[in-house]
């Protein structure tokens, strides 16, 4: 069985509101949560630096928790945030693009001209999303919004 890329094996508090997380696949990522904390009223408790410093791995290793069941952040969301902060494109962008456009795996594959399996790899975070794939998603969405005539102009 492959290592779980969203399972958290270690978590260390770095600067205020920043974590260094090691995931089950061996990836070590830094994530700055200050912006996320400031945007979400549900996370306001994390603004307290002494509270934030108590971050620990949740019971099943799939979350970072602060005091059991009080505040927790999921490993897949933390990994996506870290990927985005490092200049990459997270799997969540593919999820959101497919949802926004009501696309199945087959529909997304046809729209992008790639295999269904590759879309699934990108959507599930099994493979990094290449920039050209994300740009194709944006281009497809723009043309779809403008109607059939946009496809003729783009060709």
Image (cartoon, grey):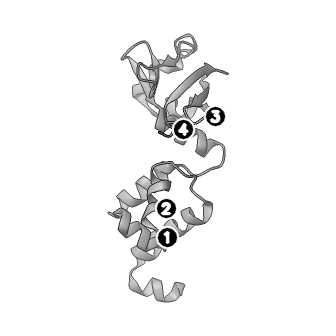
SS category of the residue bearing label 3: strand
**Cα distance in 3D space between marks 1 and 3:** 29 Å
Which label's residue is closer to the chain start, 3 or 2? 3
SS category of the residue bearing label 1: loop
Please name the residue that numbered disc 1 is placed on: 114
Left or right: 137, with 70 as reference point:
right
The numbered mark at residue 118 is 2
From this view, report whether residue 132 is shown above or below residue 59. Answer: below
**Cα distance in 3D space between marks 2 and 4:** 20 Å
Tag 2: Cα neighbours inside 10 Å, few (<14), some, or many (≥20)?
some
The numbered mark at residue 29 is 3
**Cα distance in 3D space between marks 1 and 4:** 25 Å
- Expressed as whole percent of the image width and height from the top left, the position of residue 101 reads 36, 64
Query: Closest to the observer: 71 or 125?
Result: 125
Tell me whether circle 2 and circle 1 mark residues in contact (CB < 8 Å): yes
SS category of the residue bearing label 4: helix
Please name the residue that numbered disc 4 is placed on: 79
Left or right: 41, with 9 as reference point:
left
Which label's residue is closer to the chain start, 1 or 3? 3
């Amino acid at each position: 069985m492959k290592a779980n890329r969203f399972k958290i094996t270690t978590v260390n508090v770095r600067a205020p509101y920043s974590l260094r997380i090691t995931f089950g696949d061996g990836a070590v990522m830094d994530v700055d949560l200050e912006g996320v904390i400031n945007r979400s009223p549900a996370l306001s408790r994390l603004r307290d630096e002494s509270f934030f410093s108590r971050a620990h791995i949740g019971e099943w290793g799939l979350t970072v928790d602060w005091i059991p069941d009080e505040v927790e952040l999921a490993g897949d969301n933390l990994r996506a945030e870290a990927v985005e902060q490092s200049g990459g494109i997270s799997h969540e962008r593919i999820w959101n693009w497919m949802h926004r456009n009501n696309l199945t795996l087959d529909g997304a594959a046809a729209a992008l001209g790639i295999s269904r399996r590759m879309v699934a790899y990108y959507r599930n975070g099994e493979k990094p999303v290449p920039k050209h794939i994300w740009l194709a998603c944006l281009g497809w969405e723009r043309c779809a919004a403008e109607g059939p005539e946009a496809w003729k102009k783009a060709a």
